Image (cartoon, coloured by chain):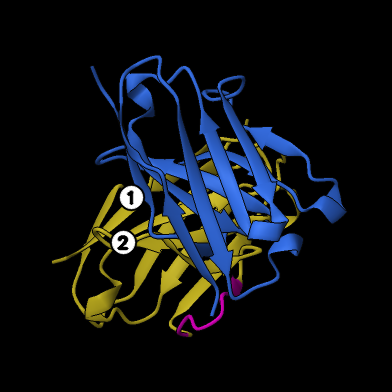
Amino acid sequence: EIVLTQSPGTLSLSPGERATLSCRASQSVSSSYLAWYQQKPGQAPRLLIYHASSRATGIPDRFSGSGSGTDFTLTISRLEPEDFAVYYCQQYGSSPMYTFGQGTKLEIK
Amino acid sequence: EEQLVESGGGWVKPGGSLRLSCAGSGFTFSNAWMSWVRQAPGKGLEWVGRIKSKVDGGTTDYAAPVKGRFTISRDDSKTTVYLQMNSLKTEDTAVYYCCTGWYLDHWGQGTLVTVTS
């Protein structure tokens, strides 16, 4: 089973700043089959990025994903107030086991 | 617009059973791979299992903690996927979400399952 470790656990930033979230895999993620999700309190998660760098439908271009192999990054170029949430990475290449990272909480500084 | 609506959650005693349903609309349900993901109170996301579309074999896969206790099935005529949960444990307490796709591109609002004596 591929274990995903996200860092930092909590990130405190101000609106307008740049956020960089990391996701590291215990072994190589097949064909960059890695996704990022955003979850706000009381809501279901929402897909942001798939295939490591492809934005999902309707996702603003301030969100970008990068990486390959075992190291992946979600970048939010300029934080908007609605971006403060919990972010999860997930790999879907090691079928049949999908695994999630433990999450990074992005909070307002 | 694609929509997923879960139902069937509630309170159950350890060792009991519960069946969750997820009704889909706004997309070609029969072509969709459907997954269940759960989230224990205050915790992160945990993949539970998945059923492929019939055209892709209709096979199921499960996470280790639920394998042998949970069963996913689908009725394409009703555009509904089911999660049959047996031998429930307190650690199965969570909000259960159904999701579409290979990567989980749409999610329902979730249904809460509480396992307690």
Q: Is residue B32 visible?
A: no
Span shown in magenta: A54-60
Dominant SS of magenta comes to loop
Q: From the viewer's perspective, tell me whether residue B109 is left or right of residue A105.
A: right
Q: Nearer the viewer, mark 2 or mark 1?
A: 2
Residue B91 to residue A98: above or below: above
Disc 1 designates what residue?
Answer: A8
- Please give the residue where the numbered disc 2 appears in the rendered image: A43
Q: Nearer the viewer, residue B14 or B42?
A: B14
Image mark for residue B99? none
Residue A30: image location, x then y, percent: 74, 48
- Lower position in the chain sequence, tag 2 or tag 1: 1
Q: Residues within 10 Å of mark 1 (few under 14, many from 20)?
A: some
SS class of the residue under badge 2?
loop
Pointer 2 chain: A
Which is nearer the eye, B74 or B44?
Answer: B74
Give B22 or B42, whichever is nearer the viewer. Answer: B22
A93 vs B93: above or below: below
Residue A57 sits inside the magenta stretch: yes
Q: Quadrant of the C terminus of chain B?
A: top left
Residue at position x 78%, y 40% from top? B59
Residue extending farthest front? B77
| Chain letter of the blue region | B
